[in-house]
Image (cartoon, helix red, strand yellow):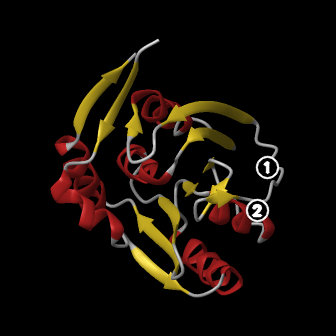
Amino acid sequence: MTLTQFKPHKSDLPRLKEPFGKLVPGEPAATMLELKRIIGDNHPRKVSAVGDVVSRETLIAGIQVDLRIIDHISMRKPSTSFDIGARNMYNVRNPAGGISLESWETIKKAMKQEDVLIVVDGEEDLLTLPCIAESPDNSLVLYGQPSQGLVVVTTTPTAKARANEILARMTREDHN
């Protein structure tokens, strides 16, 4: 079976380490309170959480999330297991430092559903980009900024265009 994946252009690597949206600094308890306020003010069409910590913390805080993407790893260490119990669940392979076509297609399908969990064999970090690109306008994509806080991306046409620019510069690789 061939694995098609996309790797970021080296000129985009520094950019990918910077928050893509609004950084809400602080520990999870504080960031979840602010996230509840943001959701209440903006009424997003969809909310996606990329990463184990943000997926777990939104669940604990009772925040409605349409799509969660986890890999059971946080800060390069196995994360504590938690039960999400999503209505729709997918398992995908996604390489570290890349985006598999399988993951991207699954995200595209998940955006048409509610209450979805994608479990990644590999790494989910860069899946934020296809989440931004595939989300309906006025949605939120959430991910953690290590040791800093929560990043909240509102999927405006500008944010989606920025994500699509980075995705368009990626190199396609096919592996057997």
> Residue type at mark 2?
Leu
| Residue 28: numbered disc | none
> Vertically, is 13 above or below 167?
below
User: Would you say the residues marked 2 and 1 are in contact, meaning their CB atoms lie under 8 Å apart?
Assistant: yes
Is residue 72 visible in the rendered image? The answer is yes
Residue 155 location (% of width, % of height): 38, 59
Report which residue position mark 1 lands on. 84
Determine the image quadrant of residue 31.
bottom right
Which amino acid type is marked by label 1? Ile
Residue appearing at x 65%, y 31% in the figure:
90
Specify whether residue 114 is in view: no
Tell me the CA gap for discs 2 and 1.
Answer: 7 Å
Q: Is residue 13 left or right of residue 126?
A: left
Residue 129 image offset from top left, x and y in percent: 37, 51
Q: Quadrant of residue 157?
A: bottom left
Q: Residue placed at 37% from the left, 72% from the top? A: 19
Residue at 52% in and 46% down: 123
**Mark 2 closeness class: few <14, some 14–19, many ≥20 residues within 10 Å:** some
Residue corresponding to mark 2: 59
Left-right relation of 170 to 88 = left
Residue at the far top in the pictured view: 1
- The relative height of residue 16 versus residue 1 in the rendered view (above or below) is below
Q: Residue 7, percent across and down?
A: 29, 41
